[in-house]
Image: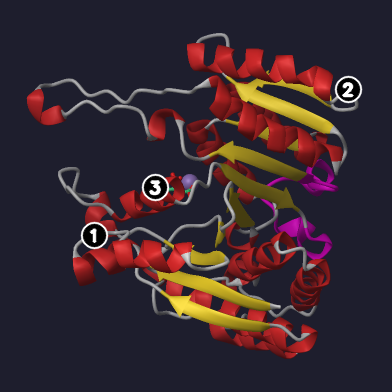
Amino acid sequence: MKLNIALLAGDGIGPEVIDQAVKVSDAVAKKFGHEINWKPALTGAAAIDAVGEPYPDETHEICKSSDAVLFGAIGHPKFDNDPSAKVRPEQGLLKMRKALGLFANVRPTFTFPSLLDKSPLKKERIEGTDLVFLRELTGGIYFGEKGRREEGETAYDNCVYTRAEVQRLAKKGFELAMTRSKKLCCVDKANVLETSRLWRETVQAMEKDYPEVEVSYEFVDAVAMRLVQWPNSYDVLITENLFGDILTDEASVISGSMGLMPSASLGSDIGLFEPIHGSYPQATGLNIANPMATVLSAAMMFENFGLLEEGKAIRNVVNDALNAGVVTEDLADGGKSYGTSEVGDWLANNI
Ligand code: IPM
Ligand code: MN
């Protein structure tokens, strides 16, 4: 297969972890007889510095003419501490999600047998955890009308959802549940929010089309609690944009490090694949960031092309590295650790 992949390294540790995913993907491509044409493009603070905006038209053209996008991370502290900044790196990511129609963000949480004791949670609570969040990504409070603070002392962010937006996300959730344990949890705040009542009503109406799927409805605050008590009781969870943002960060550390969990954003022909973690500015250039989440995001990319063996090969080699102790310092417990690029080399060489 010939694949054109837009390569958006972004900010902070983005370029370092992306380099490792490229190495590993190229090794997989070589082994399975594929050809990958990487097409680098600017995004985030790096793009603001270079051309004044975080998702330039040129980057969009490159993404649109590719089969998928592999993305590193976005964000820079110089913007975080400046509430008056007009242009922000994060706007680039939001614009890209919208422009590429990526309404479904797939964020799995799973455990690695060799890392069970690295989790902040007790082993017996997390054993067997294998859940997936489907976070709605192009609606809700992220995209609703915003109040302008210069006009007064009041600020607001509107949360808006249409039934169609909920339906298309929920449909993906039901379909995913059918390929797994057939359990779907709709996470909302329907005891307070009207948008949540629309979510609940819409999902309830869809239940009859998927009689085998057992659907539960839980409030987001209760899910936040249960996620650290019994994460292994969940299978597929669907939720709106902001709830999904928060809960997936919470869930991402269950496996032992935030540097492990991959994600996919889907909705149109072009999928975007990126680690769940952020740009980790303090670690920029130090060759210490864990590249595994990005490498596993490349696995999700191959799987989304239907290249399941290729995805499996990456997952296997990541497991092998973890078993062999070829890990970055976040997983080394003060013991021997490897640099970002050494881990990448090991993975690529052992595919
Ligand atoms: C994420 C990030 C983004 C989000 C930011 C960088 C805009 O936190 O992908 O979860 O809030 O969606
Ligand atoms: Mn987030």
Of the residues under marks 3 and 2, which one precedes in the sequence? Answer: 3
Residue type pointed to by label 1: Glu
Q: Is residue 336 at all visible to an observer of this figure?
A: no
> Which region shows up in magenta?
112-130
Task: Give the percent coordinates (x, y) of residue 117.
Answer: 76, 57
Real-space Cα distance between discs 3 and 2? 35 Å
Of the residues under marks 1 and 2, which one precedes in the sequence? Answer: 1
Q: What residue is pinned by disc 1?
A: 53
Q: Which residue is most to the right?
A: 212
Residue drawn at x 39%, y 60% as measured from the top left: 74
Question: Is residue 266 shown left or right of residue 158?
Answer: right
Cβ at disc 3 under 8 Å from ligand 1? yes
Q: What residue is pinned by disc 3?
A: 94
The one nearer the camera, 218 or 58, is 58
Of the residues under marks 3 and 1, which one precedes in the sequence? Answer: 1
Q: Secondary structure at mark 2?
A: loop
Q: Is residue 142 magenta?
A: no
Q: What residue is pinned by disc 2?
A: 211
